[in-house]
Amino acid sequence: MKKTISSYLPELIALRHDLHRHPELGFEETRTARIIADRLHDMGVEVHTGWAKTGVIGVLRAGTTERTIALRADMDALPIREKGEVDHASVREGLMHACGHDGHLAMLLGAARYLAKTRRFDGTVVFVFQPAEEGGGGARLLVEEGLFDRFPIEAVYGMHNRSGLEAGAFALRTGPVMAATDNFEIVIRGLGTHAALPHTGTDPIIVGAEVVTALQTIVSREISALDHAVISVTLFQSGTTWNVIPDAAVLRGCTRMQTPEVREQIKGAMERVVAGVCGAHGAEHTFEYLPGYPPTVNTEREAAIAAEAARAVAGPGRVQTEVPPLMASEDFSYFLENVPGCYVFIGNGFHTMSHRSDYDFNDDIIGPGVEFWVRIVELELGG
Ligand SMILES: [Zn+2]
Ligand SMILES: [Zn+2]
């Protein structure tokens, strides 16, 4: 297996560099989609385009069973101006693959090529090339368009490179691995008045200040210390001058948490605290809670399979199975709300961090990444 995969590497690296030179934002990945579709077609993989606008689905069958699993790679780049001085630097001003999705595409295409050639499995592999991970919610759109109705997917796997983890090592965990991220907006309406006569109005700044402080007691006094959660007020706008108490104050911010239960708990507590503090001071308010990506929660069976595949690739000493969850988020969570699965990290080494202008995907991990995907298929669908 390793030898065959090694023979693909020059071509996969060239492909990765080509994708890196031509980054495209979420739902605009038309060139990327065309390249993926062409490559899959050449391998003899059934191709479905136009899913979630620019997504591409490849379907590969072998043997006779109905068992179906999905492997996912994300396609989009970021609106960052590349500072790195690599030969394959972006030729599109202000856009770059700063999260390594170019590498994810190369790894999944490498696996498709190997699996299409060898077909040492019994069932169906669905290759999901998903647009718009970076905030666009491409995964949610795929679910809404019926990905799981059209293809009877029983388990789904995702892999993301991770800077700060040894190149080619793997890290994963059962249960929550990435956080949910939601936004909120609170508008407090008081009664503006002369700053010298505060008793004739209702000061929304005083009320807002108490709301900010009271919100901090939710995580510290209502959420278990063993759960991870953050509430951050990141905007507080009110007033126009020195001597006028304004009519209103606007607060905005975001929340992060690891489980759907804590998410509901935080949302309910925020509503209660905001209403209580505003009511105590006779101010009116509106509270809007804007759900973003749900938490990414790996299931036990699939995490065990991913760990076994990772150990076969990297050796047992280079696979962490109890990696601490991250407070960043990921739209792979929408797939995991529908079917069991596992999201794993592959180490990208230590030279930089993702979402930075000097980031680059590490070509040395393409081989291990391809092998990981192949081993997942051979473990899930029999060899
Ligand atoms: Zn990213
Ligand atoms: Zn990413």
Image (spheres, grey):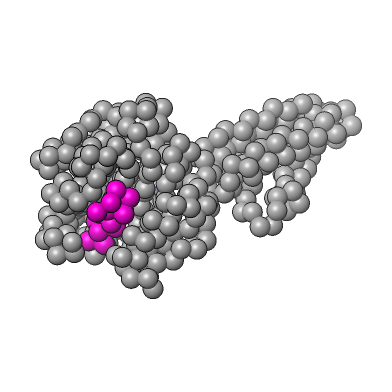
The x, y position of residue 311, in whole percent, is 35, 66
Residue 5 figure quarter: bottom left
User: Which residue in the rendered view is the most extreme toward the right?
Assistant: 199
In this rendered view, identify the residue nearer to me: 97 or 259.
259
- Span shown in magenta: 367-383
The x, y position of residue 24, in whole percent, is 27, 40
In this rendered view, identify the residue nearer to me: 65 or 27.
65
In this rendered view, identify the residue nearer to me: 196 or 237.
237
The x, y position of residue 146, in whole percent, is 37, 27
Residue 266 among magenta residues: no
Residue 278 figure quarter: top right
- Considering the whole magenta stretch, tell me its main secondary structure: helix
> Is residue 277 shown left or right of residue 299?
right
Rendered position, 175 above or below 324: above
Residue 381 among magenta residues: yes
Q: Residue at x 52, y 37 (%)?
A: 292
Q: Residue at x 76, y 45 (%)?
A: 214
Q: Residue at x 33, y 70 (%)?
A: 315
In this rendered view, identify the residue nearer to me: 138 or 339.
339
Answer whether residue 44 is visible to the viewer in this image: yes
> Is residue 217 shown left or right of residue 119?
right
User: Which residue in the rendered view is the most extreme toward the bottom?
Assistant: 317
Rendered position, 166 above or below 33: below
> Is residue 168 shown left or right of residue 302?
left
